[in-house]
Amino acid sequence: MKVNFVLSAALLVLGLIGLSSCEDEVSNVPTAEAVKDITGSWKVVQLTRNGEDLSERLDLSGFRIGFNSDGTYTLANQLPFIADAPGTYKLSDPQYPFALVLTPEGVEEDVVARFQFPMVKGKRQLSLSFSLGCESNTYQFNFERENQN
């Protein structure tokens, strides 16, 4: 009985030492997130309203949003979108953005879209979600950067 107790205690001490050494390794792993770079021209690859795919019903091929390095954006071949004029943009946080803030020219109030920046099938996507007037309808635009290698 004493042997089992001593053996169990020794194994417990070795286990705790092993776990504490793992914590040191994990705590030394760099966790800095890169600043999100959305500059470039983005084309719509999918549009949904309340989860229903509208991509087959609408011609999305011409709509583009371009984000310039100087903090301005442009729109081409307008669709119903959160902004209807070019202007300036910023991310809510450069490293951990949860929103894209657009300020269209001639408009005093910012318009805000929920922001996601996932990798899908090896390509970076930009996903913007928002409501247009009716709060019960949520639109999600999924974009891919043009000429992305």
Image (cartoon, rainbow, N blue to C red):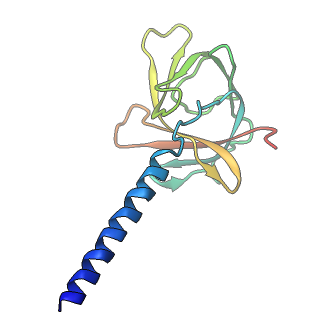
Asked whether 107 or 24 is in front, the reply is 24
- Residue extending furthest left? 1
- Residue 56: image quadrant is bottom right
Q: Is residue 139 left or right of residue 134?
A: right
Quadrant, the N terminus? bottom left
Residue 76 % position (x, y) = 71, 26
Q: Establish if 29 lies above or below 71.
A: below
Residue 74 % position (x, y) = 67, 20
Asked whether 87 or 1 is in front, the reply is 1
Asked whether 7 or 78 is in front, the reply is 7
How many numbered marks have been drawn onto this rendered protein structure? 0
Q: Residue at x 78, y 41 (%)?
A: 148
Q: Establish if 32 lies above or below 16.
A: above
Q: Residue at x 42, y 13 (%)?
A: 109
- Residue 21: image quadrant is bottom left
Asked whether 1 or 115 is in front, the reply is 1
Residue 91 % position (x, y) = 52, 25
Q: Residue at x 41, y 64 (%)?
A: 18
Q: Establish if 57 lies above or below 72.
A: below
Q: Residue at x 25, y 76 (%)?
A: 9
Residue 101 % position (x, y) = 49, 23
Quadrant, the C terminus? top right
